[in-house]
Image (tube, helix red, strand yellow):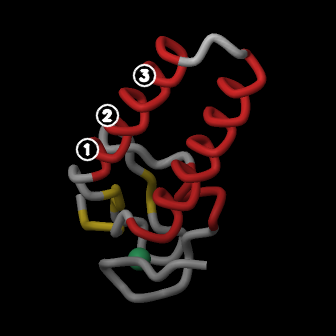
Amino acid sequence: MYNCPHCGASSISKMDKFFLGPASKMQCKKCGKEIGVAKSSYIFVVILVLMALFVVKWFDSSVVQIAFISCLTVLAVVIQLQVVPLEKR
Ligand SMILES: [Zn+2]
Protein backbone atom coordinates (compact mmCIF):
# COMPACT_ATOMS: atom_id res chain seq x y z
CA MET A 1 0.00 0.00 0.00
CA TYR A 2 1.05 3.58 -0.62
CA ASN A 3 0.34 6.65 1.47
CA CYS A 4 -2.01 9.40 0.31
CA PRO A 5 -0.04 12.64 -0.32
CA HIS A 6 -2.94 14.62 1.24
CA CYS A 7 -3.83 12.83 4.46
CA GLY A 8 -1.00 10.29 4.80
CA ALA A 9 -3.35 7.29 5.12
CA SER A 10 -2.15 4.14 3.35
CA SER A 11 -5.17 4.05 1.07
CA ILE A 12 -3.63 3.39 -2.35
CA SER A 13 -3.15 -0.22 -3.43
CA LYS A 14 -0.51 -1.41 -5.90
CA MET A 15 -3.29 -2.00 -8.42
CA ASP A 16 -4.61 1.57 -7.98
CA LYS A 17 -1.15 3.02 -8.57
CA PHE A 18 -0.48 0.73 -11.53
CA PHE A 19 -3.46 2.19 -13.40
CA LEU A 20 -2.60 5.79 -12.53
CA GLY A 21 -1.03 7.59 -15.47
CA PRO A 22 0.14 11.18 -15.82
CA ALA A 23 -3.26 12.03 -17.33
CA SER A 24 -5.42 10.02 -14.94
CA LYS A 25 -6.23 10.49 -11.27
CA MET A 26 -8.02 8.74 -8.43
CA GLN A 27 -9.67 9.73 -5.17
CA CYS A 28 -8.20 8.84 -1.81
CA LYS A 29 -10.49 6.32 -0.08
CA LYS A 30 -9.94 8.12 3.24
CA CYS A 31 -10.06 11.85 2.52
CA GLY A 32 -11.62 11.87 -0.98
CA LYS A 33 -9.02 14.24 -2.43
CA GLU A 34 -7.55 13.61 -5.86
CA ILE A 35 -4.22 11.85 -6.34
CA GLY A 36 -2.12 11.45 -9.48
CA VAL A 37 1.41 10.48 -10.42
CA ALA A 38 4.19 12.92 -11.25
CA LYS A 39 4.41 14.22 -14.82
CA SER A 40 7.95 12.83 -14.96
CA SER A 41 6.47 9.35 -15.40
CA TYR A 42 5.83 10.38 -19.03
CA ILE A 43 9.60 10.32 -19.59
CA PHE A 44 9.86 6.68 -18.51
CA VAL A 45 6.96 5.71 -20.76
CA VAL A 46 8.51 7.48 -23.78
CA ILE A 47 11.92 5.86 -23.16
CA LEU A 48 10.40 2.39 -22.84
CA VAL A 49 8.28 2.80 -26.00
CA LEU A 50 11.36 3.98 -27.94
CA MET A 51 13.34 1.00 -26.64
CA ALA A 52 10.53 -1.36 -27.69
CA LEU A 53 10.44 0.16 -31.20
CA PHE A 54 14.23 -0.13 -31.44
CA VAL A 55 14.11 -3.81 -30.45
CA VAL A 56 11.36 -4.58 -32.99
CA LYS A 57 13.23 -2.73 -35.75
CA TRP A 58 16.74 -4.12 -35.18
CA PHE A 59 16.19 -7.71 -34.07
CA ASP A 60 14.69 -10.01 -36.69
CA SER A 61 14.27 -12.91 -34.33
CA SER A 62 10.80 -12.85 -32.80
CA VAL A 63 12.14 -14.79 -29.79
CA VAL A 64 14.57 -11.96 -29.03
CA GLN A 65 11.82 -9.36 -29.61
CA ILE A 66 9.41 -11.12 -27.24
CA ALA A 67 12.13 -11.57 -24.61
CA PHE A 68 13.16 -7.91 -24.76
CA ILE A 69 9.61 -6.57 -24.77
CA SER A 70 8.73 -8.81 -21.81
CA CYS A 71 11.71 -7.36 -19.92
CA LEU A 72 10.68 -3.81 -20.85
CA THR A 73 7.12 -4.49 -19.70
CA VAL A 74 8.33 -5.80 -16.34
CA LEU A 75 10.64 -2.77 -16.07
CA ALA A 76 7.73 -0.41 -16.83
CA VAL A 77 5.63 -2.00 -14.07
CA VAL A 78 8.51 -1.82 -11.56
CA ILE A 79 9.18 1.84 -12.42
CA GLN A 80 5.49 2.71 -12.14
CA LEU A 81 5.16 1.01 -8.73
CA GLN A 82 8.55 1.78 -7.15
CA VAL A 83 9.99 4.94 -8.73
CA VAL A 84 7.19 7.25 -9.90
CA PRO A 85 6.03 9.38 -6.95
CA LEU A 86 2.38 10.03 -6.04
CA GLU A 87 1.34 13.67 -5.94
CA LYS A 88 -1.63 15.88 -5.10
CA ARG A 89 -3.98 16.90 -7.89
ZN1 LIG B 1 -6.12 10.97 1.58
Image mark for residue 54: 3
Q: Is residue 87 left or right of residue 11?
A: left
In the figure, residue 43 lies in which quadrant? top left
Residue 87 pos. (x, y %)? 28, 67
In this rendering, the answer to whether 59 lies above or below 29 is: above
**Other-residue count near label 1 (Cα within 10 Å), few / some / many at <14 / 14–19 / ≥20:** few
Secondary-structure class at tag 1: helix
Question: In this picture, is 61 found above or below 42?
Answer: above
Q: Residues within 10 Å of mark 3 (few under 14, many from 20)?
A: few
Q: Position of residue 66 (x, y in %)?
A: 72, 27
Q: Quadrant of the C terminus?
A: bottom left
* Residue 43 tag number: 1
- Residue type indicated by callout 2: Val
SS class, disc 3? helix
Q: Quadrant of ligand 1?
A: bottom left
Which numbered dot is residue 20? none
Q: Report the mark closest to the observer, 1 or 3.
A: 3
Residues packed near mark 2 inside 10 Å, few (<14), some (14 to 19) or many (20 plus): few
Which tag, 2 or 3, sits closer to the chain's start?
2
**Nearest the eye: 56 or 49:** 56
Disc 1 from disc 2: Cα separation: 5 Å
Rendered residue at 44%/19% (across/down): 53
Structural distance between the alpha carbons of marks 2 and 3: 12 Å
Instruction: Determine whether 79 is above or below 55 in the image.
Output: below
Looking at the image, which residue is at 54% across and 16% down? 56
Answer above or below: position of 80 versus 30. above
Q: Amino acid under label 3?
A: Phe
Q: Residue 46, which numbered label?
A: 2
- The verdict on label 1 being within 8 Å of ligand 1 is no
Percent position (x, y) of residue 70? 69, 38
Asked if marks 1 and 2 touch (Cβ < 8 Å), the reply is yes
